[in-house]
Structures are given as structure tokens and as C-alpha cells.
Image (tube, helix red, strand yellow):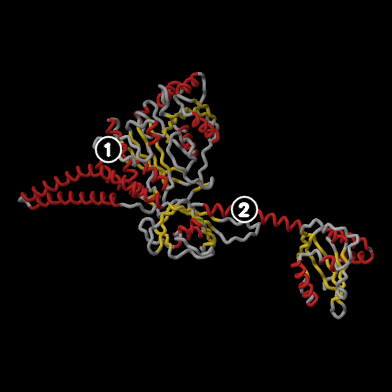
Amino acid sequence: MTAKHYLEAELEERLARDPAIWAFIRRTSLDGVWFRDLESPEHEWMSPEFWQTLGYDPVGKPHMSQAWQDIIHPDDLIKATENLARHIADPAFEYDQVMRYRNAAGGTTWVRCRGLALRDETGKARRLLGAHNDLTELVETAQIREDAFQVTNSRLNAVLNAAQSGIIGLDAAGQITFVNPSARHMLGGVVQEPPFPWPQEHLFLSPQDLQPLPRKDSPVGRAVAGELIQRETFVIKRSYGAEPRYLRVSSAAVEIDVETDVETDVVTVLIMDDISEQERTRQQAERSSRLDALGQLTGGIAHDFNNMLATIEYAVQLARDQKNPVKSGDYLDTALGAVRRGADMTKRLLAFAKSQPGLSRSWQIEEVFEHFAALVRPTIEEHIALDFSIEEAGMFVFCDRNQLENALLNLVLNCRDAMVRSGQGGRIQIFARNVTDQPDHLLDRDAQSASVPQPDVRESSRFIEIAVTDDGPGMEDEVKTRATDPFFTTKGATAGSGLGLSMVYGFATQSQGQLRIYSEIGHGTTVRILLPRGTEAGGREAPVARKQARDGGGARVLLVENEQRLLEIMTELLISLGYKVTSAGDGAEALAAVKDGLEYDILLTDVVMPGKMGGFDLARALRQIRPDTPVLYMSGYTGFSEAEMGEVVAPLIQKPCPPDDLGHALYLALHKKPT
């Protein structure tokens, strides 16, 4: 047996000989003590603290059991009587319960009541010693919290029930633990109460071939596995009858605070939006746009077919009239080659005409460009050059290839039509490069853009930017503003549907990318499509560690930009990169500052600005004053040639430009000798 601590023994000894100590404990630690005679149970001594806790004056209160029994809740009196009987019969059963008393103010006081039977040498209970603790404040606080929780829960349920999005909570096993009315409707009116397994008759299908997806590839399997799904399109269909639904699905994991020790049966939430009507409308509009493009394709292809047929006809006639078998064979080989070229062209045309919207996957840029070039070249007039270039080999783009080719075809045909109608320009450039994500407002003066989800600031999603640039007449501001509006066209009522750029914009946003339009009157137009970067394995590339922008080291930048808002934010950006900045709103202001003695280390200037002095003119004028100072041009339009730059040929960066790319370009320009 463990020896009693000396302080405990001392306290017991002091309690035995000094009543003041017991009175102190009773007064400060307990809200009442009672002592009951079990041989005469109507007799019970109640300490003054008990009555005071309930708001009564203890003076004159009888020490009788009936006194407290008259103010206890009837249900609790029954419970107290039953528990007391069990404790008297079995010492191992503790007498410990919470009871409700009517206090002097007419309200309810919650009291914890504990008792101990004092037994004689035979084990018979003779007395009952008990103590009270007032729990009213704790109970009322808990009730307030419970009421607040109920109100919050009620409001949340009202929001979830009214939401048009289908919202489903899943546990670790993939069982549905919560489902709102919209989600029930999407699941065919399922009436089961959670938890229940995902209905087997509702299958997620591949949008490409409408075949059932393996569970691990379905949004349910991916979300339960911890994957974050961001506005991806899926098809869901009952295994019997009914039209398939197109759903835009997102997911979010439910984070559990281990410190609160709150258990939850929801590990992830699916949010589903029914976009069936929008998707079918989009597909119908895309088919209309595709037919429009197909009509233009056939004109150019018909010319090539005529050449092939003429080749075949002449070769066959020559072979028939030729007496020399070797010569005859050569003619027939020529005819056979023309047949094969015709078959390849027909195959491409049929593939383009019959292609349907498919599942996004990874495509190598070189392969996409090679196939598209063969398809589109016959439609472009001979005097218009069509150039393809890639920043680096081996890049993959994650999208629907059929829609990408349709988008590029619309852009190329728009370039061609603008140049043919105006008589200005003769080159179309299609260029692909790798870019990182950036805020939409950064260096983005006049882009038509849709937001791209921004991941963790320490990480960066990489995109493939495909830019289609012409050196035609350019767009007026009003045309540029309305360019992506459905049915808006500058070609006249009989020359176009007005759906081309609208469909390109829809494709970019649906692919979780962006569309940006830059145009300079008299110089040309650049349309950029930003699409997620893919991987060789076929999926979308995961975010990568964000590059640190190179520090400017205090170098002095003369920044020239006529757009005031852009000038201000670029000034702040350059300062954050470690540069000292002097800004000017146009070329004349910058030139005047330098003539007044302004010192600077590099000129960073927009190319096209109002007034007589553009960026190329400014660079030429400043080079006369500061011949060794480097120059860096910036423009949304990327079709400028070295000949247009004139005497000062310098690097040209595309706007918008991510901070790390801008810092790198400035560093290279500062450490390279001028030309």
C-alpha cells in the first residue's frame, strides 16, 4: 500500500481538530453540503451554501428532505431516487448526477450532486454524505453555443438547399455523407438518406469516347484520394436510358483541426455544376464555326485537288502512249504519288469535319503544328507567308486537340481575311512558348483575358502560349473590345458568322486558360491563347517551384509607357525587383529628361505610343546622346521586324511579362553590348 503523503496526513489531522479549515473548504470549494440519516430519511441537514446557491435565505429552512424535494424537477427526483437505491445496494455504483432545481427567482439552477453512503461494520448504509456544485453557468454557456450552432447550421442548410450547384460530402471510403437537393437531382432524384454508397447506376464517362471511367480516374476516386479538382468537365450518365449530363466538377479536402479533436465523417466535398445546356450550345456553335471554316478550307483544297487530278490525267495519258516500259512506269509512279497526296488531304479534311469535342490530354506542340500546317496551307494565298516556330523543342500542351486546331484555323483565316481585304501585310506567324502564370492585371493593358487559378504563391503553374500574329492593318479599339462577342463580325453579313473569335475565347476559358488580343493600328494583330502545359505521360503538368526574380542591384531604369495605370504598377514592380526607376508618359517627356541631364542605365520602352515619337524613334534619339546605353522594347504585338526597329535593334519582350521573366530580360540587356 502506498504511504500517505505527509501533507495529506497533516491536512486530515488539522481538519479533525480545527473546524475552521472544514468551513473554509465548504465555503470556497463547494456550493452546498448535505448529510442524510438513512435510518430516518426524512431528516437531512443542508448547509447554508446550498440554499444560497439557489438564491434562498437559509435562515429558517428546515433540515428535512422534503425541503429540497419540493423544488427539484420531478424527472430528476425520480432519477435521484433510483440512483440512490442502486448506490446503497452496491457501493461500486457511484451516486453522481446533474439535477435541475427551481431557484428563488423562478428560473432553473443546474447542480451536480454527488453522494457517498457511510456504512457500519456490517456494510449497511447508515448515513449519506453529499456535495453540490453549481453548473448553471457552464450549462447555459453550452446551451448558447448549441443554439448558435443550430442557427449557423440552419443557415448553412438553407444556403446548401438553395444552391444550384450540387454539393456532396464524401467519407474516406467514398460514401456519400451529405447531399443537397441539387446534387440529388443530378443523381436522378436519389432519395436515400446518408450515408450511402455512390449509386452504381450513375457512371462517370470519358468526354472523349463516352466510355465509363475507372473509379480511380473518376472525380469521386480522385477527390477521396486527396486530389484537388478545379472546374474540370465530366460526363455522368445512368447505366440505363436518360441523356448524359455534362458536369463541371471541383473538389476541396476538409481539413481537420487535431487540436479541437472534432470528429467528422466528411473528408472531401464535391461541387458539381450542370453545364449540359451550355455544353450542347457550345458544341452547336462550334459545329457552325467548324462548318464555316470547312467551307473556307474546301476552296483552297479544291485548287490543290485540281492540280492533283491534272497530274494524274497527264501522267496516265503519257504512260498509255509511252512505248518504253521504264518511262511508262515513271509516269504511273507520278500518278500514284498524286493519288496518295489526295488521299492524305482527304483524310485530314474528313478528320477535321468529323472531329468531336474530346477529353483534354497532352499533345506535343511539334506534332500539332505539323498536322495543322498541312491542313491550313492550301487555304492561304501564295503571296501570304505562313511561319511556324517553337521556343523550345519537346513542349506539350494539355487541351482538346480538335478544338485547338479549330481555334488556330479561325485565327489564321481571320488574319488572312484582314490582310486580303485591306491589301496590307503578307505574313502570318504562329509561335509557341512556355510561360508562367501571373496576375491578370500585371503588364496587361488591353488583353481580353479569363482568370487562371492561382496556386500557392511559392509555386507556379506553367502554360503554353500559342501566339498568332499578322502584319495586317490592326484593329480599332472598338473592334478589339467587341472581338470576342458572339456574332460580331467586320466581314459583312454574308462573309462570316461572327462566331470565330467567340469560339476561340470559349475554348481557352473552358481549357482553364486565357485569350489575349493585342493590336496596333498600321502594324498588325497578335492573338495569344494560353493553355495548360502538359506532360509526356499525357496529363497536365503539376505546379513547379516559382523562380526567384533576379535582383536589379540598384540599376537605373528609364521606363516609358503611355498608359498611366500600367506605368504606375510597372514602376512599383521594378522597384520591388531592386531597380531605381524614372518614369515617363511618352517619348517626348523621356527625351527631354535625358537632355536635362537624367542618368540611367537602361531604357525600357513601349513601342507604339501616341504622338510623333514611338519607342523605336525614342531609342534612336537617345542612342545619339547615350550611345552605349542598352535598350529593351516591350509590346503586346510581337510582329515587329528588325527592319522596323531601324538603327537600334534590341530585344522585344511580350506584354504581359511575368516579373521573373522581366527581371531576366533586363539582366541580359544590361550585360550585353548594344548593337
Q: In this rendering, would 279 be left or right of 322?
A: right
Q: Which residue is mark 2?
A: 152
**Which of the 4 quarters of the picture holds residue 49?**
bottom right
**Residue 655's spot in the image, x, y percent?**
44, 35
- Residue depicted at 51% across the width and 38% down the height: 550
In what quadrant of the picture does the N terminus appear? bottom right
Q: Label 1: few (<14), some or many (≥20) within 10 Å?
A: few
C-alpha separation, residue under disc 1 versus residue under disc 2: 59 Å
**Residue 39's spot in the image, x, y percent?**
87, 76
Residue 575 in the image: above or below residue 134: above
Q: Nearer the viewer, residue 646 or 96?
A: 96
Q: Label 2: few (<14), some or many (≥20) within 10 Å?
A: few
Tell me whether the residue at label 1 lies in contact with that at label 2, contact meaning CB atoms closer than 8 angstroms.
no
**In terms of sequence position, does the residue under pointer 1 or pointer 2 come before the other?**
2
**Residue 435's spot in the image, x, y percent?**
44, 42
Q: In this rendering, would 386 be left or right of 264?
A: left
Q: In this rendering, would 612 be left or right of 67?
A: left
Q: Which mark is residue 494?
A: 1
Q: Secondary structure at mark 1?
A: loop
**Residue 58's spot in the image, x, y percent?**
88, 60
Question: How many numbered callouts?
Answer: 2
Q: Secondary structure at mark 2?
A: helix
Task: Tell me the kind of residue under disc 1.
Answer: Thr
Residue 56 in the image: above or below residue 645: below
- Residue depicted at 41% across the width and 39% down the height: 516
In what quadrant of the picture does the C terminus appear? top left
